Image (spheres, rainbow, N blue to C red):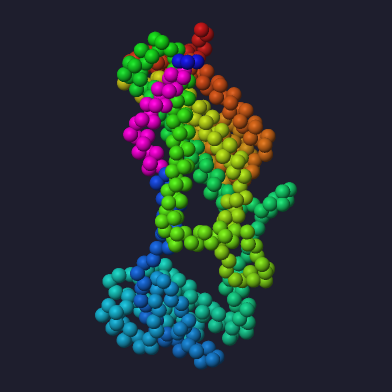
Amino acid sequence: MNKIKIIIKREYLTRVRKKSFLVMTILGPLLISALWVIPIFLSQATDSQSNIIVVDGTGVKEKDAAPLFEGKLRSDKNVKIEYMNDLDKAKLLLKEGSTEAVLSITRINGMPPIKSFWYHGDNEINALAMQDIETQISTLFKDYYLKYNCGVSDSAIAFINNPKVDFYSENINTGERTFREIKMVLGVALGFMIYFFIFLFGSQVIRSVSEEKMNRIVEVLVSSIKPTQLLIGKLVGIALVGLTQFLLWIVLTFAVVTAVQNAMPERFASVQQGKITMNEQIANAEQLSEPTNDNPDIIQGLFSINYSVVIGCFLFFFITGYFLYGSLFGAVGSLIDVDTDGQQFTLPITIPLIIAMVCLPTIMNNPSGPMAFWLSIIPFTSPIIMMMRIPFGVPGWQILLSAGLMLITIWGSVWMSAKIYRTAILLYGKKITYKEIWKWLRFKN
């Protein structure tokens, strides 16, 4: 046992002292923080305001003699709307560079149809601004037609323009609201993290074992320790490295995000407002036509998740998934030397992980379906698929069954990998086949 501790300590300290560990520990939180902070900055970023001249040439006026379009198009932080009656003069201003675009709205062959013409210089106008203005024009014309040709009231038109229906789902057994979109995002994120960590630290196991074999260091090590103990020590040591880096990422990410929030509180004012109003409900069911803020629902959805179960299951499947694949990767590493291509042995091991990621859309569409159930029970896919299902709520017996099968499979995987490792670690320059590996597994000490 003391020898295994020495190997664990050696593997752990060797890796945490590397520059690559320090670089990834720093870059990881910065990248994670950027995924959260940058969208906020982008959503609040403002381009230079575009100046647009609108010429209403339809001649259509409302009953109060007000022009149909003039003065009705909204300016915002990206677009400034001005109105003129002379199209030729507006085009002249465009050629001089006094404005960025001219919008001419005309009536052709009676009413309808209404046609719109854009005139611009060398640079095209912002596509989003153009789309917004086109939508406003269509809405104004539709409102005019409904009001004066069909006799529809203003309140009915307002409802037609914004027929928003708030959709709520509730668990009949618990009485709690469910937030499917938020759980989907969380499930995909957790599944990708497990997938990423298994490949990241599994590749470290392959590299560590193969390097020691090719450098002949392993010949010195196995003279004082059993190959099985050496493999187990490597697995535990690299697992501790992974957990250390993961915990540092959590702490540093929280610190970076907090520092950015404190440095620029005005940028995050809307987010904080969403947190303040997260418990607000619809005060009046008759006000469905008024726009509502989606931030409270998002915050409530995040708070509705049982994070103790999510974190506990994540740590379990992170560790067990690593040990399952890490032991197999360790066996592959022992098969590799200068003359051996490890790809033929690595590909069959990674196929279950690839299958899990390919099935991701199906799992997200039906997290309680037969495919989701069986892939979350089969040990080689359960670390990823189960973590995708956990945010949606998984019966306890399914989690226990998956965990039990995972532990049994890990025991068999470590036993099998140890037998391969013990024989292959001292073989050099020999082409190894699956048939020969099968003989090693059947051999009794």
Q: Is residue 161 magenta?
A: no
In the rendered view, does 209 fall on the left or right side of 305? Answer: left
> Up-down: is 215 above or below 250?
above
110 relative to 342, above or below: below
Can you give x and y, in whole percent of width and height, for residue 222 in the image? Answer: 40, 12
Left or right of 298? Residue 248 is left
Horizontal side of residue 57 vs 100, given as left or right: right
For the point 29% across and 79% down, which residue is it? Answer: 98
Horizontal side of 425 relative to 151 (left or right) equals: left
> Looking at the image, which residue sits at the far top?
445
The percent coordinates of residue 53 (x first, y second) are 37, 80
Predominant secondary structure in magenta?
helix
Q: Residue furthest front?
A: 262
Would residue 13 be counted in the magenta stretch? Answer: yes
The magenta span reads 4-28
| Image x and y of residue 173, in percent | 73, 48
Q: Is residue 117 visible?
A: no
Q: Residue at x 52, y 31 (%)?
A: 319
In the foreground, 54 or 33: 33
Given residues 250 and 352, the one toward you in this image is 250
Across and down, in percent, residue 21 comes to 37, 34
Of 285 and 432, the residue lying toward us: 285
Q: Residue at x 51, y 44 (%)?
A: 189
User: What residue is at 39 percent from the left and 66 percent from the top?
Assistant: 46
